[in-house]
Image (cartoon, rainbow, N blue to C red):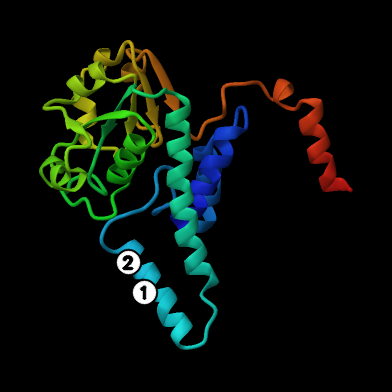
Amino acid sequence: MRVAFANMLFSLCSEVPEADVDRITGALGYRMGRRFFKGAVPYGGPCWPRDNRAFSVFMDAVGVPSLMPRTIDLCNEEHGRYILRKVLAATKREDVVGILGLSYKPGTGVIERSFGIDLADWLVGDGRRVVAWDPLAIPAARGILNGRASYASVPEECLRASKAVVIVNPMRELEAIDWSSASATTVLDPWRCLSPEAVSKIGKYVAMGRGNGGAVKEWRSEEFASKLGLLNS
């Protein structure tokens, strides 16, 4: 529930100029705590998706409405599609998209319900070519993606080959990457985890969850202002 709520704020802040999801979750964190409260990618893995759905079934079995856990599951799925749409908007058919991180979280080779695997599969389905790098999960990914993606032996190879790269996992290995290899690449960072030094070497860096690059005054066009006016009607 916390992850889904933070990711909802992530999507909202991505569309509003000068908004910053980290400022909002940081402010709310004083009351709600900070654990698992960062807008980024959907949750995955062998536990949370399974347990949330099992909880829904149990609630139905005992006659308690399961709307909340089922809605959380739907929100988590839609958030992945939201990030997919952003990647598709930054590329065109036949472009190479790089994925940094295939496991469901850093420090493991487990790919069960991994967003990195889902994203690779979706991108291929939308006509993109995928090259991926992960320090631990490539052997498992080969069996699941079954030839639909290629794999880089080092992350710099992934950066150089790609039109756009998505940082799926905020791995500690990112600190050692030579980001000048992305001098002609768009890097989409849902975690906003790269240092200013790394960002300075990248062709185009997109800190997802921080505005849409416009100005508030221009964003509040007459058409949009009329939509907001409905709130007062």
| Residue located at (51% from left, 41% from top) | 10
Q: CA distance from mark 2 to mark 1?
A: 6 Å
- Count of numbered circles on the image: 2
Q: Which residue is mark 2?
A: 50
Q: Which structural element holds mark 1?
A: helix
Q: Dot 2 surroundings within 10 Å: few (below 14), some, or many (20 or more)?
A: few
Residue bearing the label numbered 1: 54
Please tell me whether mark 2 sits on a helix, a strand or a loop.
Answer: helix
Q: Is residue 149 left or right of residue 128?
A: left
Percent from the top left, x then y, of residue 53? Answer: 39, 69
Residue 197 as seen in the image, left or right of residue 29: left
Check disc 2 and give the amino acid type. Answer: Arg
Q: Quick check: marks 2 and 1 in contact, CB under 8 Å? A: yes
- Residue sitting farthest toward the bottom: 62
Q: Measured along the vertical axis of the image, is residue 194 above or below residue 114?
A: above
Left or right of 121? Residue 74 is right
Residue 167, quarter of picture:
top left
x, y percentage for residue 201? 32, 12
Residue 156, how many percent across, how many down? 19, 20
Q: Specify whether residue 29 is in view.
A: no
